[in-house]
Image (spheres, helix red, strand yellow):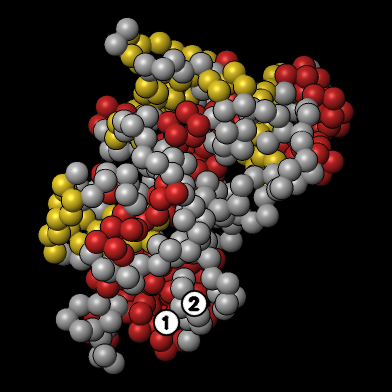
């Protein structure tokens, strides 16, 4: 078992038997970097949310990622929880995950057999399952910098801003030519067994005027999601909020 | 597993399972019972300590990850018999009630003051990426959002942190003169 910040694995650790083997990755330099190039930022898997939130290039060029980092847990969690942990645990309520979908990130993983890259939209294979093989480690997320005509946004809805697990959250990247939506990537969390791109919304808004895109998106999202009732919210509430959220992404763009 | 780390400036060695929580090593092996357990899930912040310059929940840290590292607990906030500015302010403002959350709040608040995370105390800073109101009070509330208090409603705690930050900003000549 690999361990870094421990914010998932250490929960109630005193009530559970010690795992038979633990590989501690905390502060391992090979996964603790942020590398900036002209068109993308590579964020090492060991980078904490505190570091993501405060990184000047991420703040300036990927605001939704910095914003999501700021609402993951609170100060103490942000100091330990890592990007690699969020994509590795792959919870449907992982707050950064819709952002990685909307920004079309790619993950880099490595094993003794070599390195490979997986587009993040193909990473999640089910409830908390991913394409990561048993002998592989997550090395980094490679995140393309949104172009000048692209508006990006992220929003989380929970009982309070800090600590609470999201009822619904989502992110969008909307490509504009004037007020014409040329393309979009829209992603939601907590509405399915994994974080998902809502491709029906993306198809519905392509070629629409910005003023009409919100309503088209609302109708499309209705048919595309299958939220559940659970301890944090109801399917009915999640459905209504998801519709409003996606519509608002276009009215705010 | 035998390991050595620094606690409140002193080198300590323990021989324990690497899976044991830092929280339990502090309380059971080192008898530093100022650090409290609230939820054991990283939700409440009662067990906050500073590990290598970061405020963390000690219930979520495996002791095996602490070899060679440095920890400050609530017992390490005072220096030479003088309480930290935030401890004095919590006393002066009445920023404590039942007391379970207080050590975690004192450690976290001392950390955010000492590391300059609050920023200028009397100025509004830039609008945050998520549009949060960023007056000093709002910044304190956000930075302390991982410390849950079920008694006081936070008003007096935030008063105390603002007061301590103001005192720290005014300079060391005022610090400690009441102790």
Return the disc, 1 or 2, that comes first in the chain's sequence: 1
Above or below A246: residue B33: below
Query: Disc number at residue B90?
Result: 1
Q: Residue furthest bottom?
A: B178
Relative side of A229 to A169, left or right: right
Q: Secondary structure at mark 1?
A: helix
Which residue lies at the image location 62% right of the left edge and 33% below the top edge? Answer: A92
Q: Are marks 1 and 2 on the same chain?
A: yes
Closest to the observer, B171 or A32: A32
Q: Secondary structure at mark 2?
A: helix
Total of numbered circles in the picture?
2
Q: CA distance from mark 1 to mark 2?
A: 7 Å
Q: Position of residue A100 (x, y in %)?
A: 55, 28
Above or below B139: residue A145: above
Which residue lies at the image location 46% right of the left edge and 18% below the top edge? Answer: A132
Q: Are marks 1 and 2 in contact (CB under 8 Å)?
A: yes
Q: Quadrant of the N terminus of chain A?
A: top left
Q: Where on the picture, by quarter, is residue B10?
A: bottom left
Quickly name the residue at label 2: B157
- Please report, as a chain letter, where disc 2 is located: B
Q: Quadrant of the C terminus of chain A?
A: top right
- Please report, as a chain letter, where disc 1 is located: B
Q: Position of residue A50 (x, y in %)?
A: 41, 46
Relative side of B4 to A191, left or right: left
Q: Position of residue B8 (x, y in %)?
A: 20, 66
Which residue lies at the image location 55% right of the left edge and 23% below the top edge? Answer: A129
Q: Residues within 10 Å of mark 2 (few under 14, many from 20)?
A: many
């Amino acid at each position: 078992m690999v361990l870094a910040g421990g914010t998932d694995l250490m929960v109630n650790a005193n009530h559970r038997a010690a795992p038979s083997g633990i590989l501690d990755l905390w502060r391992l330099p090979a996964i603790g970097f942020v590398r900036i190039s002209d068109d993308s930022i590579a964020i090492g898997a060991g980078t904490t949310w505190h570091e993501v939130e405060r990184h000047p290039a991420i703040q300036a060029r990927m605001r939704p990622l910095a914003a999501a980092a700021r609402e993951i847990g609170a100060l103490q969690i942000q100091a330990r929880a890592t990007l690699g942990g969020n994509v590795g645990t792959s919870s449907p309520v992982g707050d950064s995950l819709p952002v990685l979908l909307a920004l079309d990130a790619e993950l880099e993983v490595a094993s003794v057999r070599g390195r490979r890259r997986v587009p993040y939209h193909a990473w999640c294979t089910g409830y908390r399952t991913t394409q990561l093989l048993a002998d592989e480690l997550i090395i980094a997320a490679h995140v393309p910098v949104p172009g000048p005509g692209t508006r990006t946004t992220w929003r989380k809805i929970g009982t309070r801003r800090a600590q609470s697990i999201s009822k619904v959250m989502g992110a969008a990247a909307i490509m504009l030519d004037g007020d014409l939506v040329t393309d979009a990537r829209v992603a939601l969390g907590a509405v399915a067994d994994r974080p998902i791109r809502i491709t029906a919304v993306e198809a519905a808004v392509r070629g629409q005027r910005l003023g009409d895109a919100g309503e088209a998106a609302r109708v499309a999202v209705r048919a595309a999601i299958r939220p559940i009732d659970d301890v944090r919210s109801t399917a009915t509430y999640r459905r209504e909020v998801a519709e409003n959220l996606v519509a608002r992404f276009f009215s705010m763009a | 597993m035998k390991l050595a780390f620094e606690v409140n400036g002193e080198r300590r060695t323990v021989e324990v399972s690497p899976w044991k929580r830092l929280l339990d090593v502090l309380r059971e092996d080192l008898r530093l019972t100022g650090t409290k357990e609230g939820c054991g899930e990283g939700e409440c912040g009662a067990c906050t300590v500073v590990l290598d310059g970061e405020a963390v929940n000690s219930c979520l840290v495996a002791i095996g990850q602490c070899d060679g590292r440095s920890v400050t607990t609530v017992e390490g906030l005072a220096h030479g018999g003088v309480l930290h500015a935030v401890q004095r302010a919590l006393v002066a403002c009445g920023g404590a009630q039942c007391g379970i959350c207080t050590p975690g709040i004192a450690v976290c608040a001392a950390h955010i003051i000492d590391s300059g995370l609050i920023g200028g105390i009397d100025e509004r800073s830039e609008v945050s990426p998520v549009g949060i109101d960023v007056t000093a009070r709002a910044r304190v509330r956000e930075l302390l959002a991982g410390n849950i208090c079920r008694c006081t409603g936070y008003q007096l705690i935030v008063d105390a942190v603002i007061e301590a930050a103001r005192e720290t900003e005014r300079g060391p000549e005022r610090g400690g003169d009441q102790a």
